[in-house]
Image (cartoon, rainbow, N blue to C red):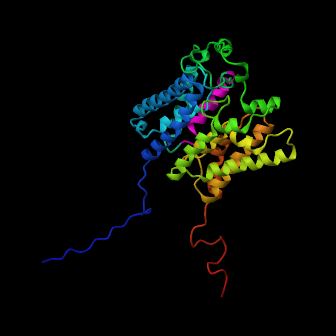
């Protein structure tokens, strides 16, 4: 009777794999964004809901059409949903819907598909769409409306349904229904930069301020980011290094001139820093993966954010800081590659020159 010889299988690393797929990670990230989106709707009402629906649907539809034209399909992995949600969360809640749709198309077509699709994009697609909208429609993208209006769940912000290429609708009638103290035509960053008016950190932390749809509640964003870090679906080092470097940079300028510059807590809780650090800077595709590289990458974006805020022409700098970080990410990764085990420096004998 012939005995069966044992077989040996040869496989490449990694030999131990975590039961995570791209689809699972993307669905969890999309799920983590839902509380942020829900708070945006709670704060700004049905206009924010329409905005988020427009950006998300336009992103999904654009990816579907491009995938069909190229013979593939990636809509099911929820990456387009994430792009749409993030884009909508970075925009003013009263932005005209047609502009939101244009931003969604640009985010997928130019920010993702142009580079080869999921896994090949150099820049965060949502920020590509947002950057285009800010360049094309600067007034609309920097026109803010207050949150917490009594009629926000039954009435749209008038500018929401502005016809394409028409002047933005006048929101004066809607504003008259609000108390004068509740209305602020500028974000806390703009009030601080141009008027020297400081918003209470507690208002920033809990999200009771004017701003983009998803940039107002630092607390909600931190909770959602902690969930992703706990599930090991986000490299926590990137947001930590970005926030820490922003706080340290802000502290230096605050200690040098506290009358002119805001304190570190204001820096952390205001604007889009929290949303950008947690959900955009940590983009797995556009960020480095080397141990030292992720710290350098995050620190660079945090420093650039504060420099633009304090000394640039715009009150906010998170978008440009992250896009800059995306651009230099390959360089950072190349310069911070760990030494191969057993490798020696060029020209140095393997035994260190010992006899």
What residue lies at 76% left-to-right and 38% top-to-bottom?
308
Left or right side of 205 for 248: right
Q: In front here: 285 or 16?
A: 16
- Residue 61's image quarter? top left
In this rendering, the count of numbered labels is: 0
- Is residue 270 visible to the viewer in this orientation of the structure? no
Q: Can you say which quadrant of the picture contains the C terminus?
A: bottom right
What residue lies at 57% left-to-right and 30% top-to-bottom?
40
Q: Main secondary structure of the magenta part?
A: helix
Left or right side of 198 for 53: left
As for residue 5 lying within the magenta part, the answer is no
Task: Give x and y (percent) for residue 98.
Answer: 55, 20
Q: In front here: 162 or 240?
A: 240
- Residue 346's image quarter? bottom right
Task: Give x and y (percent) for residue 11.
Answer: 38, 64
- Is residue 127 visible to the viewer in this orientation of the structure? yes
Q: In front here: 220 or 281?
A: 220
Left or right side of 350 for 74: left
Task: Give x and y (percent) for residue 246.
Answer: 72, 46
Q: Residue furthest bottom?
A: 355
- Residue 205's image quarter? top right
**Quick check: 330 above or below 156?**
below
Task: Give x and y (percent) for residue 321.
Answer: 69, 41
What residue lies at 12% left-to-right and 78% top-to-bottom?
1
- Magenta part of the protein: which range? 121-139
**Quick check: 115 above or below 160?**
below
């Amino acid at each position: 009777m012939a005995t069966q010889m044992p077989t040996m299988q040869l496989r490449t690393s990694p030999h131990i794999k975590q039961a995570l797929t791209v689809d699972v990670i993307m669905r969890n990230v999309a799920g983590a964004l839902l509380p942020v989106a829900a708070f945006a709707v709670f704060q700004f009402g049905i206009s924010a809901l329409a905005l988020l629906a427009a950006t998300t649907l336009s992103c999904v539809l654009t990816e579907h059409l491009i995938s069909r034209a190229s013979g593939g399909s990636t809509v099911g992995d929820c990456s387009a949903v994430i792009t749409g949600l993030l884009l909508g969360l970075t925009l003013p809640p009263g932005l005209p819907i047609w502009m939101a749709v244009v931003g969604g198309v640009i985010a997928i077509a130019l920010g993702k598909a142009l580079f080869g699709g999921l896994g090949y994009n150099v820049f965060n697609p949502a920020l590509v769409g947002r950057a285009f909208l800010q360049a094309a429609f600067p007034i609309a993208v920097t026109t803010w409306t207050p949150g917490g209006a009594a009629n926000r769940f039954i009435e749209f912000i008038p500018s929401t349904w502005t016809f394409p290429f028409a002047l933005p609708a006048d929101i004066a009638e809607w504003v008259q229904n609000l108390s004068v103290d509740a209305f602020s035509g500028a974000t806390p960053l703009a009030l601080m930069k141009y008027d020297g008016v400081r918003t209470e950190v507690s208002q920033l932390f809990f999200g009771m301020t004017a701003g983009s749809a998803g940039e107002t509640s630092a607390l909600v964003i931190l909770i959602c980011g902690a969930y992703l870090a706990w599930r090991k679906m986000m490299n926590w080092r990137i947001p930590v290094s970005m926030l820490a470097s922003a706080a340290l940079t802000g502290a230096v300028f605050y200690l040098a001139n506290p009358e002119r510059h805001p304190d570190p807590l204001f820096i952390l809780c205001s604007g889009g820093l929290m949303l950008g650090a947690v959900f955009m800077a940590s983009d797995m595709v556009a960020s480095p993966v080397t141990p030292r590289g992720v710290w350098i990458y995050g620190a660079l974006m945090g420093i650039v954010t504060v420099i633009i805020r304090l000394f640039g022409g715009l009150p906010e700098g998170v978008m440009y800081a992250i896009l800059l970080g995306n651009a230099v990410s390959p360089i950072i990764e190349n310069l911070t590659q760990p030494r191969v085990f057993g490798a020696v420096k060029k020209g140095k004998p393997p035994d260190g020159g010992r006899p």
